Amino acid sequence: MKQLHKEIAETVNKMIPEEWGKFYFYAQISETGGGTYFFYNTPQNTQSFTYSLKIPFEYHMDQQEFKKCKRKLFELSNQLRNSFENNHQELWYSFTMSVDSNRKLNIHYDYTNWFDTKSSFSDQMMIWKRKYLGEEASEEKDRALIAKYDSEFPNDPI
């Protein structure tokens, strides 16, 4: 598992086109699919995070190379989940990895099957961004969603 964590971190690092201060990587995997994304900040702007999908457009990167790396992140995440299964451990549905510029690594596994809830992917992302990036919802309907999540999941599993 350590090797997979390392490869994920190295792939994210390769995809970030500038010096970064911290990044948060998220993977959601199930038997039927899933996805990955990450956000990063810079040492000059620690309160603002860049969304991974904006990188090829804002930095005029080769989109094919970026897609190849994105597929690799999904494959590595899937391998990580499979290693849990192969070792007879409870399967997680998502995990978050954070790495700072000192290479301090934190990993959190979430066992909530978000595919079986009424939460959309964008709902989940909003909840995730609040927890990890400190981003507060600006619209009333989004604040209501956060309040509902807090009441349904008081242990904040994401």
Image: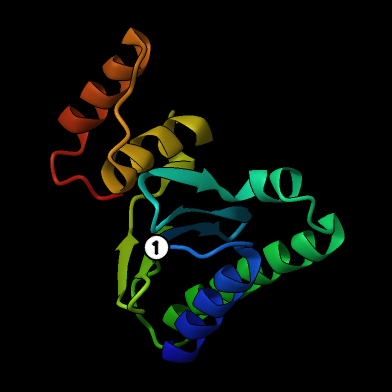
**Residue pictured at 52% horizontal, 46% vertical:** 50
Q: Is residue 124 left or right of residue 61?
A: left
As displayed, is residue 90 above or below residue 5?
A: above
**Residue pictured at 38% horizontal, 61% vertical:** 96
Q: Nearer the viewer, residue 49 or 90?
A: 49
Secondary structure found at label 1: loop
| Residue 43: percent from left, percent from top | 38, 58
| Residue 28: percent from left, percent from top | 50, 55
As displayed, is residue 46 above or below residue 89?
A: above
Q: How many residues crowd around disc 1 within 10 Å: few (fewer than 14), some, or many (20 or more)?
A: some
Q: Is residue 64 left or right of residue 75?
A: right
Q: Nearer the viewer, residue 65 or 1?
A: 65
| Residue 103: percent from left, percent from top | 36, 79
Question: Which image quadrant: the N terminus?
Answer: bottom left
Question: Which of the 4 image quarters holds residue 21?
Answer: bottom left
**Residue pictured at 49% horizontal, 90% vertical:** 3
Q: Is residue 78 left or right of residue 26?
A: right
**Residue pictured at 70% horizontal, 43% vertical:** 58
As displayed, is residue 2 above or below residue 17?
A: below
Question: Which of the 4 image quarters holds residue 108?
Answer: bottom left
User: Which amino acid, by three-letter code, is at mark 1?
Assistant: Gly
Reading the image, the residue beneath label 1 is: 21
